[in-house]
């Protein structure tokens, strides 16, 4: 494809990353991949059948419907886009922020990450033990809703309290409203790492809950630190394991259920 000579690094706020290549024909080409909504907002064209067309409202609506259907089926969607970089770039330039604008939609990448086989039964057991299960994720809310419906984390419609909310929506709330939402909400989607930590802190400090956090990625580190019990797995990112209090040797929720039972028995005996 050519020689890579620049990049725009991924951040949890931008939710995308880009690489800039110098092609054999001398042109500079930027390729971007990232969260669907964030990348689409930076696109003005779409490539269909080898031809390029203006994105327009109708094509954007059709694309949104297609991605919405994929999310509802539990698929994560990554949007790939590109553009020719005609701006003058010298050999010493290292800051390419803003170059990923006016791009052309190239296509979609879809990923399916189904819950573990024991997840539904384990969550039911936890709920039976009085443990309130919440989901804090950086994923799209459609994907999160699909998983939570399948696992019956949200069982009944609640017309008094919001059951699902996104990070951008949380960011617009005043402090009191934020804590009120966190008290009852079950699904938190498109959260930044700091927002995960804020939700954990709210549950602990404002609502007096004892909170365990299960996470295996870099974006879970803040929440793992803030939780009463940070739990990771031995296949997780090294920094996540460093932040955790407990590391599971098997990636099974049933182990956590058994730990709750044994812990309560031990405390009762003591």
Image (tube, rainbow, N blue to C red):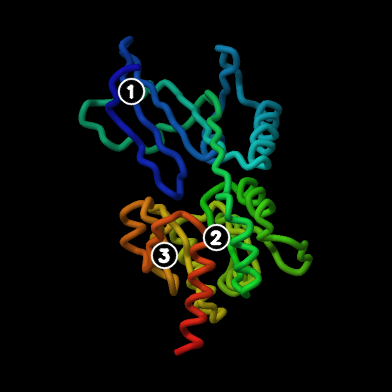
Q: Specify whether residue 135 is in view.
A: yes
Upstream in sequence: badge 2 or badge 1: 1
Q: Is residue 17 above or below residue 51?
A: below
Q: CA distance from mark 3 to mark 2?
A: 21 Å
Residue shown at 45% from the left, 40% from the top:
16
- Name the residue nearer the viewer: 234 or 118: 118
Q: What residue is pinned by disc 3? A: 224
Q: Secondary structure at mark 3?
A: helix
Q: Is residue 157 above or below residue 130?
A: above
In which quadrant of the rendered view does residue 90 lie? top left
Side of 14 relative to 8 (left or right): right
- Give whichever of 140, 241 is nearer the camera: 241
Q: Residue furthest left?
A: 92
Mark 1 closeness class: few <14, some 14–19, many ≥20 residues within 10 Å: many
- What separation in Å lies between label 2 and label 1 (alpha carbons)? 36 Å
Can I make out residue 172 in this image?
no
Task: Report x, y in % for residue 144.
Answer: 61, 51
Please tell me which residue is depicted at 52% across the width and 24% down the height of the picture: 104
Quarter in which the C terminus is drawn = bottom left
> Within 10 Å of the Cα at label 3, are there few (<14), some (14-19), or many (20+) other Cα atoms?
many
Q: Nearer the viewer, mark 3 or mark 2?
A: 3
Instruction: Looking at the image, tell me whether mark 1 or mark 3 is earlier in sequence order.
Output: 1
* Residue lying at the far bottom of the rendered structure: 270
Residue under label 2, please give it: 171
Checking the image for residue 21, the label placed there is 1
Alpha carbon distance from label 1 to label 3: 38 Å
């Amino acid at each position: 494809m050519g020689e890579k000579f620049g990049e725009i690094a991924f951040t949890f706020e931008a939710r995308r990353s880009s690489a800039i290549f110098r092609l054999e024909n001398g042109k500079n080409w930027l390729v971007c991949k990232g969260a669907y909504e964030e990348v689409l907002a930076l696109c003005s064209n779409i490539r269909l059948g080898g031809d390029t067309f203006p994105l327009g409202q109708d094509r954007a609506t059709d694309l949104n419907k297609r991605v919405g259907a994929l999310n509802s089926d539990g698929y994560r969607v990554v949007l790939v886009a590109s553009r020719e970089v005609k701006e003058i770039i010298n050999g010493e330039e290292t800051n390419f922020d803003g170059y990923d604008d006016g791009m052309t939609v190239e296509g979609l990448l879809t990923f399916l990450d189904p819950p573990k086989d024991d997840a539904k039964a384990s969550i039911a057991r936890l709920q039976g033990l009085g443990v309130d299960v919440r989901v804090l994720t950086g994923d799209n809310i459609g994907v999160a809703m699909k998983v939570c419906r399948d696992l019956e984390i949200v069982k009944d419609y609640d017309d008094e309290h919001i059951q699902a909310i996104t990070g951008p929506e949380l960011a617009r709330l005043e402090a009191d409203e934020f804590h009120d939402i966190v008290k009852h909400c079950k699904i938190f989607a498109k959260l930044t790492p700091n927002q995960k930590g804020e939700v954990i802190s709210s549950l602990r400090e404002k609502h007096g809950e004892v909170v365990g956090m299960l996470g295996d990625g870099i974006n879970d580190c803040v929440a793992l630190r803030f939780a009463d019990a940070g739990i990771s797995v031995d296949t997780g990112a090294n920094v996540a394991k460093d932040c955790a209090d407990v590391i599971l040797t098997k990636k099974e929720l049933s182990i956590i259920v058994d730990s709750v039972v044994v812990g309560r028995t031990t405390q009762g005996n003591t």
